[in-house]
Image (cartoon, rainbow, N blue to C red):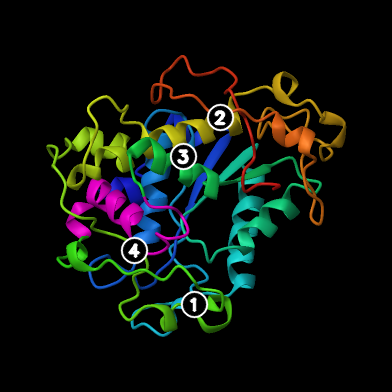
Amino acid sequence: MTRDIIPDLTTTDPAATSKIAVLPVGAFEQHGPYLPLGTDTLIACAVTTAITKHHRVLQLPPVTFGCSHEHAAYPGTVSIGAATLTAIVTDITQSLTHQQIRGLIVVNAHGGNAVLTNVVQHANQSAHQLKLGLYPSREDWAEARTAAGVTSSNHDDMHAGELETSILLAAHPDYLRDGWASSDHSATDRRYLTTLGIGPYTPTGVIGYPHKPPQPKAAPPSTTSAVTSPLSSTSWHRRLSPSRPREGLATVADRLFHRASTCRTSQVCTHSSRLPAGFTSLPLLPSARAPVRAGHSASPSVRRHQPPLAATDCFSAEHHTTPQRPSLHGYLS
């Protein structure tokens, strides 16, 4: 468990010389009475581990604090400012540049860290050669939910709900406490959350459905499957269809990695003339659509050419091919 959070690499390990690094970013905030304050960090590390188990990348230790001001009313929550988080990621990026790293995948597991979008966009417009990608996006999470058979939506299952509880049950079950089975709370209308924080919408800090009505249970996952397929394999406390591929979060992690690192720009970028300077020469962060700058939206013709991803085997060594829908959800959208 410790190695999944604090890498045990030495300077002579092959991964230490990888040209792509992965940085998990979490938070230290309330997640109800049953999930730990470090839930977002554990989830970010689970996604990162799913990548590093099967691809040679430089796994960085997590950023364990984030912008959690919306949870300030709950004991234990500790936040850093947006400027501080920006400075941390920027400094890490500069250090990686000196190490000849060409790309950094920022794996963010806390929605309040919205400033990371600006950090990534700004970095990719700068002169240095290191390019950044920000994952998972809302669309990536939605794909993970669908693949794992999680029926709640990103909006309704916002915090400490079905998704986060499932991942923790898979990747770090020892961190859970009793209470998740009876803590469902609905608050779909949260129009003033940005102003008031989450407190007025939930007495416990939970917005979501950590436990749905009782359904037939499947056998608990093995340790290996829990690590390599954290979301899908761990929904063992809910119904699992025997015919459904158990891809879940592992597949999403695999997809985003290959979107970011193994596809050649010339294969998938049909609007390369509109990419930032230096972007087309780097096989990092390809896109099948034109990048969308702030204040602009993608044209309907671009949106139409994004067919849904088909189910694929997780972490296959032969996956060094162009995905069916390479994209940059959460990067320039």
The residue that disc 4 covers is 160
Point out the stretch of residues depicted in magenta: 152-175
What type is the residue that disc 1 sits on? Glu
The residue that disc 3 covers is 143
Question: Which residue is found at the position 74% from the left and 47% from the top?
Answer: 124
The residue that disc 2 covers is 308
Q: CA distance from mark 3 to mark 4?
A: 19 Å
**Toward the viewer: 258 or 146?**
146
Residue farthest toward the right in the current orientation of the protein? 273
The residue that disc 1 covers is 70
Which label sits on residue 205?
none
Disc 1 crowd, CA 10 A, few/some/many (<14, 14-19, 20+):
some
Disc 2 + disc 3, Cβ < 8 Å: no
Question: Which residue is found at the position 20% from the left and 61% from the top?
Answer: 176
Question: Which of marks 1 and 4 precedes in the sequence?
Answer: 1
Disc 3 + disc 1, Cβ < 8 Å: no
Q: Position of residue 170 (x, y in %)?
A: 24, 46
Q: CA distance from mark 3 to mark 1?
A: 26 Å
